[in-house]
Amino acid sequence: MKLVGIAGILLVIVGGLALLIGLVVCINTWTSDYVSSACERAARDKEAFDEAKERCGTTTSECYRAATVGLTSEDECENRKSFMQKQMIMGVVPAVIGALLAIVGLLMAIGGFVLGRRKKAVST
């Protein structure tokens, strides 16, 4: 039974590490201004895109490309939102799996060491 306890301790360590990594990713993603800054720039640059389209005509012309170089588009805002949602998922999944592994490992460790300490009755 002590082997079960040792395996439980290893699961607690691995699960705790995965939980910590997942939580760090979630906190960094939650507090990041990566999306909000891009969407604010896209809102400010929307007028410049409209003016360039009126002046140059089509959006595929060289004039339009030159006029909109360095501006942030709505597509970039949406791409960043999508990226951050995927990053949040990549943080939540390891955090949940790590928490489950840590709980199972803790139960295994407690059970393995408590049950391993009980001595079997000697029959004569």
Image: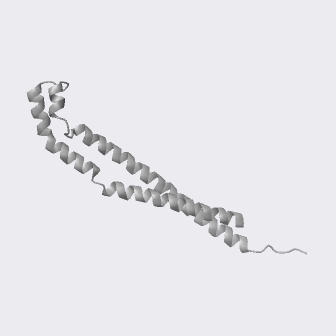
Residue at 38% over, 51% down = 88
Q: Is residue 116 left or right of residue 110?
A: right
Left or right side of 23 for 110: right
Rendered position, 82 above or below 124: above
- Image position, residue 66 (x, y; %): 17, 31
Quarter of the image that includes the C terminus? bottom right
Question: Image quarter for residue 72?
Answer: top left
Q: Quadrant of residue 75?
A: top left
**Side of 123 relative to 56 (left or right):** right
Q: Is residue 102 above or below residue 42?
A: below
Q: Residue furthest right?
A: 124
- Nearest the viewer among 52 and 124 is 52
How many numbered discs sit on the rendered protein? 0
Residue occupying image coordinates x 61% and y 62%: 10
User: Which is more toward the observer, 96 or 36?
Assistant: 36
Name the residue located 31 percent from the left edge and 58 percent from the top edge: 31
Q: Give left or right: position of 44 versus 79.
A: left
Percent across and percent down for residue 1 are 72, 66
Q: How is the image coloured?
A: one colour
Q: Position of residue 30 (x, y in %)?
A: 33, 56
Could you say where residue 12 lies in the image, as x and y percent from the top left?
A: 57, 63
